[in-house]
Amino acid sequence: MAQTLDILSHRTETLTSMRGIVHTMKTLSAINALLYDHAATAIEAYQRTILEGFRAFVRHNRALMLTTKRAPIRAVVAFGSDHGLCGGYNELLTDDVSKHLERHGHEPTSALVLCVGARMKVAVVVRGILPERTLLPPASADGIGRLAGVLAARLEKIWHQSQPDEPAVDLAFTQRVAGGSQ
């Protein structure tokens, strides 16, 4: 009987410790969510600025004539999550990427896909999509600029090598909407 009581006491202590760990993880996740929410707001403002710059460029330069016709290149940048407690985030996003590639007539093995996040890479590879490159997601809001620079440089290199007439980049990510859904 004493041995059984000791075992039960040990199990109770273990469960109490695990409960504390889970509570701490949830708290840290909530804190990080606020930081990433602020970063997302900043990125949206940056995106609006870039789009306004493109509009001004097109307004100022009107029609640009290209001399030769080359095949279009469509790149997909899939922003996954390497954080736990996200459920099937990467898998759901991969389903959308796969459908998007099919709509544009791309075979999964020949599509130009850049993954952000190791878990995203695993999710796309399982679906038969071979990413051209996998990049690490930023560990903080300060790393977002670094990641944007690396992505822009990689896409520029790809387009410089192939010189397509119609380069396109599609971004795959989730976005929160009213009611907490994505």
Image: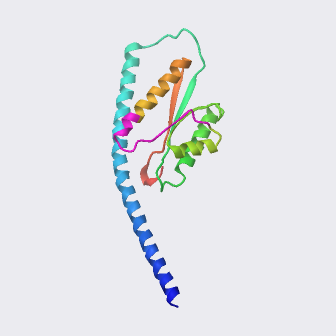
Q: Position of residue 74 (x, y in %)?
A: 56, 28
Asked if residue 164 shows in the view, the reply is no
Q: Where is residue 73 in the image (x, y as percent from the top left)?
A: 57, 24
Seen at 40% across and 30% down, the residue is: 149
Q: Which of the pair 177/31 is nearer the observer?
A: 31
Q: With respect to residue 15, does 57 lie above or below?
A: above
Residue 9 falls left or right of residue 32? right
Q: With respect to residue 157, does 142 lie above or below?
A: below
Q: Magenta span covers which residues? A: 130-146
Q: With respect to residue 111, does 82 lie above or below?
A: below
Residue 104 falls left or right of residue 3? right
Seen at 66% across and 33% down, the residue is: 107
Q: Where is residue 135 in the image (x, y as percent from the top left)?
A: 48, 37
Seen at 57% across and 10% down, the residue is: 68
Asked if residue 12 shows in the view, the reply is yes
Whether 135 is among the magenta residues is yes
Numbered circles on residues, count:
0
Q: Which of the pair 58/4 is nearer the observer?
A: 4
Q: Position of residue 92 (x, y in %)?
A: 56, 48
